[in-house]
Image (cartoon, grey):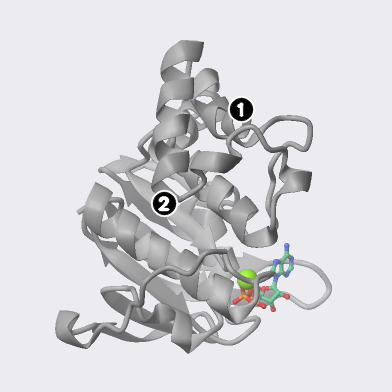
Amino acid sequence: MLLKVENLDKHFGGDVPLHILRDINLELAEREFLAMIGPSGAGKTTLLNIISTLDAPTGGRVLIKNVDVHRLDQHALNRFRNRRLGFVFQDDLLLPHLTALENVALPARISRRSTRQASRRAEELLEQVGLNDRMKHKPGQLSGGQRQRVNLARALVNEPALLLADEPTARLDQATSQGIVQLLGELNEQLGVTILMVTHERELTNCAGRVVEFLDGRIVSDRSTDPGRRTCTKPLDT
Ligand SMILES: Nc1ncnc2c1ncn2[C@@H]1O[C@H](COP(=O)(O)OP(=O)(O)OP(=O)(O)O)[C@@H](O)[C@H]1O
Ligand SMILES: [Mg+2]
């Protein structure tokens, strides 16, 4: 199993102590595309942050490729994140003074690949996400949908074992959102990228092979989508 979340609990302290995640158990196999849906405040981001090691659990553990990630020391953790995980958030975190190509290549440079190798891989991925003619553009010269595609390419440059996406379409209009989700579906099918995506909108779960519903810090349903009934449409030009 690529990802195993075991008996995960999360409390937040403060004046009013909050019990946000309650005994979460979740497994994700390689090449799965799981969409997680649930109302605002249900704990989706909290769970994703714990899986991505940005936050620590109060109880339970997270295994990624059999590594108990919260037991790694800081150095090992940074390395693990850089090499094994890809992130896409609702805010795009592209560096404004770098071109699309340089932004995508950056994590590969951090993992000490040569400039040439990093650029070549970044170029391939930008082609894959349909931005062949925007490689030299800076983020300010791109549309929101295009920036999010650059983000996706960047998240994939080190060939992560797991791509974590927290509402990657939150700032985009509906057609553009559908294009991004379709692209995730394609990356999942063609490159075999394993994806865990959080979204608010049920319509955006149509490209995923599995949909998990989250309510009040608990998983309340977990269903596989019949491939014949998936209504993933062709990506739109965003
Ligand atoms: N650092 C924190 N300290 C205290 N409470 C927190 C903290 N982070 C999150 N919470 C609380 O945890 C709950 C779950 O938040 P979370 O961001 O995980 O929800 P979500 O399901 O991602 O919601 P949304 O769909 O709006 O993004 C919320 O009630 C929030 O107020
Ligand atoms: Mg959230």
Could you say which is closer to the camera, residue 229 or residue 131? 131
Q: Is residue 152 above or below residue 231?
A: above
For mark 1, give the secondary structure. helix
The numbered disc on residue 163 is 2
- Residues 211 and 144: in front is 144
Instruction: Name the image quarter holding the C terminus.
Output: bottom right
Who's the residue at 33% across and 77% down the image?
A: 232
Residue depth check, mark 2 versus mark 1: number of the one nearer the observer: 1
First in sequence: mark 2 vs mark 1: 1
Q: Quadrant of residue 67 in the image?
A: top left
Look at mark 1 in the image and give the residue it sits on. 102
Q: Position of residue 27 (x, y in %)?
A: 27, 64
Amino acid type, label 1: Glu
| 134 relative to 34 in the view: left or right | right
Whole-angstrom CA distance, mark 2 to mark 1, is: 20 Å
Quadrant position of ligand 2: bottom right
